[in-house]
Structures are given as C-alpha cells and as structure tokens.
Amino acid sequence: MRQLYLPFYLTFQYLRRGRKWTLLLTLFLMTVAFINLIFIPSLFSGIIDGANNQIIDTMTGNVYIMPQDGNDYINNKDKVIDELRTVDGIDAISARTLVPARLKYKNITGNWQILAVNPNDEKNVSNISSKMISGSYLAEGDVNQIIIGTQIAGGKDIEENALSFMGAKVGDKVSLIFDGKPKEFTIKGIFDSNFVESDKRAFISENALSEIMPIAVEKATTINLRINKNANEKDVIKDIESKDINGKVYSWEEATGLMKSVSNSFLTINVLLSFTSVMIAAVTIVIIIYVTIINKRKEIGILRAIGIKPYIIVASYVLLSAVYAFSGIIIGTLVFTTILMPYFQLHPFVLPICNAVLVLNWPEFIVRADIIMIVSVIAGYIPAVIITRVKILDAIFK
C-alpha cells in the first residue's frame, strides 16, 4: 500500500528540493505555451462575435421583414407596425424606406444607399445615433438635413476614400437627385460605426421623404426589429409569421452572407494555427520534461539501486509533468482572464468590421487544456521509461 504513495512523495521531493529558478522558468514556459494555445482562437471568436453584433446593431436588428416576392415595398407600414407591437418579445421597431436617388457633392456623384426613417424609432433599433463623430443625429422635423457615413464623407484613413466625397464636412451642401430633380440637403452629421458596409449609407427623415416621394409615406422597404434579450428569436419569428403581415420574416443571421464567408475563413485559419500552437506547446513541454529527467539521470539510478521499482519512478515523473501542466494552465488562465482580456477590452483590435476583443470560448478552452495535460503526461512518460531502462551503473556513473 505504501508503494502507492511513493510516486506522490517523490514528486513532492522533486519540487521541494529542485532549484527554484528552474521551477519558475518551467512554469513560465508552460504558462506561455498555454496562453499561446488559447490566444488566437479567442481573438478569432472576438472578431466573429464583434462582426455579428455590428450587423445586428447597425444593419438589420435582431429580426427584419422584407416585402413579399415580386413587391418592392411593404404597404400600410403603420398598420404592420401596430400589428407587430402585439408580439411578445419585441422591444423596438423601425421602418426604413430605400430612397431611389443619387447623392451629389460638388462634382462627385454616387449611388449609395439612402434610407428614410423615423429618427426616434431608428434610435431604438440601431446604434447609429450613438456613432456620430461630427455634427448631430437626425430629428423628426428635419426636412432638409441628412446624415452620412464616413465611407461617403471620405477623408484621410477612410477605406473607400477614392469612391467617396473625399472630405465632405458637417454643414456642407449635398444634392439628392430623385427622378432627375435635385433637392438640396445640409449634412447634419457624420457617423462612424466602424463597419464599412454600414458606413456606406445615408439617412434622412420620413418627413423629408414625404416632400420627395409623397406616395412612399405609407410604404417601407424593410421593417427592422430589436427583440428583448430574454426573448427567443425563433419564437418571435414564429409569432410574427402567424400574423397577417404582408412580408417575409428573416433572422439577422440570414443577412450575413459576407460575414459567413469571413467566419468560415477564420475557422479554417483557426484550425491550422491551433494545430501549429499544439505542436509548439508539445515540443516545448517535451523539451522541458526531457531536460528535467536527463538532469536527474544519476538520481534515478540511485533510486533504482536502493530498490525503487521503475514503474514508481515513471509514475513520479508523469505526476511531475502533470503538475507542471496543471500549474501552467492555472497561471495562464489567470493571466489571460485578469490581464490580457481586460487590457484588450480597453484597447481592442481596430478592424474595418469591428473593434475586436478577446472572447474565451469555454468548450474550446477545456479541449485545449486537456491537450496540454495529455501532451505533458506523454512527455513525462516516454523519457522516464527510456531512462529507467538504462543499466543502473550506467545511469549513476555515465
């Protein structure tokens, strides 16, 4: 029975009597290996989550309604909105009407998406009102004002500056050309949502639309919904579809064609980099454990000479490897969650699709922790078995 405790005792003695700087260096390397293994997947998760939130917050809402096939508009939008207000789980509703017009600034003309909205309703569905970097957001009574995204305004460091107004500012005049007739608008504000597709849009009020297209006042191109955080999206969609609404209902996920491709690319890259990280971690751990055991070759020979069974010695080094791995995982997790994640929360990676932070996917985290433990145990087992098969005298004197 005492033999069962010997591996634990030997492991404790290795740790207690070993050089402290060697132990600290080993734990440092194990910690770095583990952080390296979880950093890139967490970054990719942050990019994907950030991009998805951008689509919801700036483009579609949680759920959106489109016209039936063959129709350009949802008719009687006020009636539809009243019907939607009876659906549980919906927090806010905004009707958007696409204005078939072009924008002209000085000698530059572009076909950007121009949307007519009720500013107050839109404020509750999208976050555009909080993304104004110059000027101010629309008001319901604005009939000669327009807000535009940074990709339309243009300027230094703008991704699509060559296709923009190349530096339009708040207070400048732009012409909205509808049916060949220009109507002058003043740029009231410029917004930057840090999402290129969203920033290639302009907004006017429904009151402004009524002067340009009186026939479109009771029509909408899309109706966008923000649902309660506690509501089930699929249940809300089913409830909407059960209503007498002349439109097709979609989840925000169905508007993510481009981002699905990006996400799939990230997943592929993630797999490749994860494999590389595992290999690096494995090699690091094997080297650490192998060097540790080689340096204790003489000690292992002495233990065998006094009658300690080889399997006990092997078990003790397997336990030592597991202790190193487990300690690296614990320290790495603490460093990652208390230092790296908060730091990048305050200083995110600024990308054209979102401000990316580190998002720890716990199921993936557990898999990677298991990988480190398994690799460490193998790394401890193989060298220990090799050393214990060396002749006792050779282990002691060579």
Image: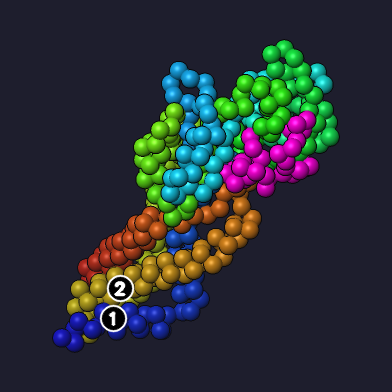
**Residue count near mark 2 (Cα–Cα under 10 Å), binned few <14, some 14–19, many ≥20:** many
- Residue 350 position, x and y percent, is 63, 46
What is the quadrant of the N terminus in the image? bottom left
- The residue carrying mark 1 is 8
- In contact (CB < 8 Å): disc 2 and disc 1: yes
321 vs 332, left or right, is: left
Residue 197 in magenta?
A: no
Q: Residue at 28% of width from left, 75% of height from top? A: 316
Residue 129 in magenta?
A: yes
What is the quadrant of the C terminus in the image? bottom left
- Residue 307 position, x and y percent, is 19, 83
- The residue carrying mark 2 is 319
Q: Residue at 78% of width from left, 28% of height from top? A: 185
Q: How is the image coloured?
A: rainbow
Residue type for callout 1: Phe
Say which mark, if any, is on residue 105.
none
Q: Quadrant of residue 6?
A: bottom left
Q: Residue furthest bottom?
A: 2
Query: Which callout, 2 or 1, points at the residue further toward the start of the chain?
Result: 1
Residue type for callout 2: Leu
- Residue 242 position, x and y percent, is 36, 37
Query: Start and end of the magenta stretch?
Result: 117-146
Of residues 108 and 264, the one drawn nearer to the viewer in this rendering: 108
Question: Dot 1: what SS?
Answer: helix
